[in-house]
Image: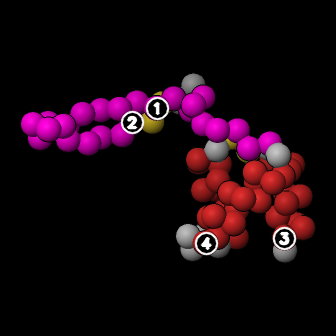
Amino acid sequence: MIVHAAHWPNRWGQVMNHYVEDNSKQRLTERLEIVTAINILRSQGYDNDDLIREITRIFYVDLDEYNEAVSVAA
């Protein structure tokens, strides 16, 4: 299990730590979900080379479905 830390100041200016476990990521297993995520990332300026890195950073992705969705969209 991988844990990511986010840091932000509280109301007194002290830095607070917030830990998020990877198992809290949403799973993308349906093609429609994957295509929607791809379209959102593309609209935010991500190119095809950066899509896989960014989408797997945010979600657990069915890579077979991802590859099929990308090949159909290309």
- Residue 39 visible in the picture: yes
Q: Nearer the N terminus, badge 3 or badge 4?
A: 4
Give the residues drawn in magenta, as a range.
5-29
Q: Choose top left, top right, bottom left or bottom right for residue 4.
A: top left
Residue shown at the point (57%, 74%) measured from the top left: 45
Instruction: Judge from the rendering whether residue 26 lies leftward or rightward of residue 4; answer left or right.
Output: right
Whole-angstrom CA distance, mark 3 to mark 2, is 35 Å
What's the amino acid at mark 4?
Ser
Q: Nearer the N terminus, badge 1 or badge 4?
A: 1
Between 67 and 11, the residue placed more toward the observer is 11
Q: Quadrant of the N terminus?
A: top right
Image location of residue 70, percent across then percent down: 82, 64
Residue shown at the point (63%, 64%) measured from the top left: 40
Q: Secondary structure at mark 1?
A: strand
Between 4 and 30, the residue placed more toward the observer is 30
What's the amino acid at mark 2?
Ala
